[in-house]
Image (cartoon, rainbow, N blue to C red):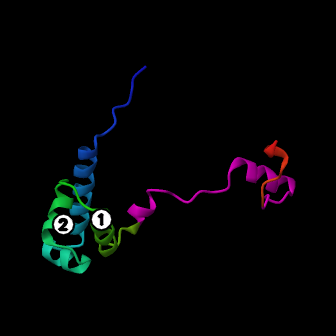
Amino acid sequence: METEQKLSVADWEVRLGAQVRRARLLEDLDQISLAERANISVGALANLEHGRGARLQTLIRVCRVLGREDWLDALEPERGPGPLALARAREGLKEPRRASNRGAR
């Protein structure tokens, strides 16, 4: 059985930084302009783009300016109803609003 190799944190930082840089260039922005619009330092942006570590706040600000908040939304997609909720709906039952005392014994 072949095990899937997981990327290291450093690899993810480099990959994410490259995506940020690509998005910036597609918007025809230089680092100074993007940093100003995101209210961050040019050094913070350069660190993010080169995978040298960045604060989450920096990433969020840059994503907003680039119009890529969808990247942030992709971290936890909206959950639809679970299988029990679907079964209850199919049977016309309502979702419970509180726990019963049956499991407290």
Residue 71 lies in the magenta-colored region: yes
Which badge, 2 or 1, comes first in the chain's sequence?
2
Residue numbers of the magenta segment: 70-97
Distance between the Cα atoms at labels 2 and 1?
Answer: 9 Å
Residue 61: image x %, image y %?
Answer: 30, 72
Left or right: 26 with respect to 6?
Answer: left
From the image, tell me which residue sits under label 2: 45
Q: The residue tagged with tag 1: helix, strand or loop?
A: helix
From the image, tell me which residue sits under label 1: 59
Left or right: 95 with respect to 11?
Answer: right
Q: Are marks 2 and 1 in contact (CB under 8 Å)?
A: no
Residue 45: image x %, image y %?
Answer: 18, 66
Residue type, numbered disc 1: Leu
Residue 47 lies in the magenta-colored region: no
Residue 89: image x %, image y %?
Answer: 80, 56
Q: Quadrant of the N terminus?
A: top left
Name the quadrant containing residue 48: bottom left
**Residue for point 86% across, 53% down:** 91
Left or right: 66 with respect to 79?
Answer: left
Q: The residue tagged with tag 2: helix, strand or loop?
A: helix
Q: Nearer the viewer, residue 69 or 45?
A: 45
Relative vertical location of residue 39 with respect to residue 91 in this rendering, above or below: below
Q: Quadrant of the C terminus?
A: top right
* Residue 2 marker: none
**Residue for point 21% across, 55% down:** 53
